[in-house]
Amino acid sequence: MSEERNKRVVVVGGGVIGMSVAWRAAAAGHRVQLVDAEPASGASNVAGGMLAPLAEAWPGEEELLELGAASLRLWPEFADELARASGLPSGLRREGTLVVGVDSADRAELDNLADYLARLGRAVTRLTGREVRRLEPSLGPAVRGGLEVPGDLAVDNRLALAALRAAATAAGVEFVAANAKHVRPGAVELEDSTMDCDVAVISAGVHSGALHPALRDRIRPVKGEILRLRARSTALPPPSRTIRGPVRGRQTYLVPRDDGGLVLGATQYEVGFDTEVTVGGVRDLIADAERLMPGIAEYRLVEAAAGLRPSTDDNLPVLGWLVPGVLAATGHHRGGFLLAPVTVEAVLALLRDEEPAIEIKAADPSRWGGQQCTS
């Protein structure tokens, strides 16, 4: 294999993970090509952009929580570096997250989350409904309680994607508008040609499983629908913080954007590669969000879209060598933006033939029973 600062790297996939890896690998001195027929057009383009490992914590997923928390710590520096490298805003929002509940079952779920986090040494602040509305006056009287999670962040996904493409281009990444068909050591096969490389990085989201046998049947698409709204002049402004909450047992989020924008999400279906927006999905998103924030009835509906989350059976991503010369950086489920910085650091370490951070070990492909591969 070539020297550390002179490897030919082909990154397959142009979402948040692929472009982040390509940018930072090129900035580290590698010769990088990124293969994607339409960069920034997949799941990353319709993401909510929550950076919220605590608010999304779930019993039994402690390794994912640790991985997310490690990546969250990297995000401020990652965002600052991205803004400098691109000359564009990174889209990072630092206002924090409120997790709110409406009925008794929802509030019991919040109590369970707070108790679970406390057992892990990660305290959050419990709030009454009145205290929640004092922080975010646009929330309605149905909200009876909540948890304040000030450390969780958010990012405007489309601003970040624009900055990543600009930073990658400035660092010398060559964008190749093509679809990859197969990845093997030393080469990425396209529809009508082959690209030689020292290392191929598979970051193709839900399409990753078709590129290498080790990923076949390991990554499946999970559909998610979102709505983009914008406050009209007669409406209350959106909340300044990200609002999450179980509503009738369904997880709902409202993520603010600049200039009165608000993202509502997200449905979750196991329906293969279907990306059509359904009437039922739109109905549920609006009904649940309106329960938390009645004022959205006055908002303008800007966009309804659906994306496919690349998911694994244990919800952990796939980060590591599949075989010598082929790296996987995929399967991030709903955490692509959250996990981008820690994924980048892991890939850079592996390109240097070093061990990545300890939190990465749980995401190694060897967890499926194979031997851990080295470069």
Image (cartoon, grey):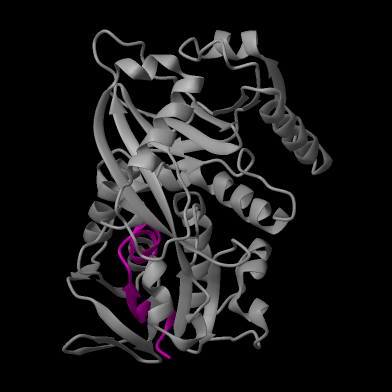
Viewer-proximal residue among 80 and 117:
117
291 displayed left or right of 144:
left
In the displayed structure, 177 sits above or below 263; it is: below
Residue 14, x across and y down, in percent: 30, 63
Would residue 46 be found to the left or right of residue 58 on screen?
A: left
Taking the spot 36% from the left edge, 81% from the top edge, the residue there is 7
Confirm whether the magenta stretch covers residue 302.
no
Q: Which residues are magenta?
A: 1-22
Task: Give the camera-side residue of 161 and 133.
Answer: 133
In the rendered structure, the answer to whether residue 327 lies left or right of residue 226 reads right
> Which quadrant of the figure contains the N terminus?
bottom left
Give the residue drawn at x 26%, y 29%: 301
Q: Residue at x 68, y 84 (%)?
A: 369
Q: Is residue 303 above or below residue 241?
A: below
x, y percentage for residue 62? Answer: 72, 54
Q: Which residue is more in the foreground, 252 or 39? A: 252
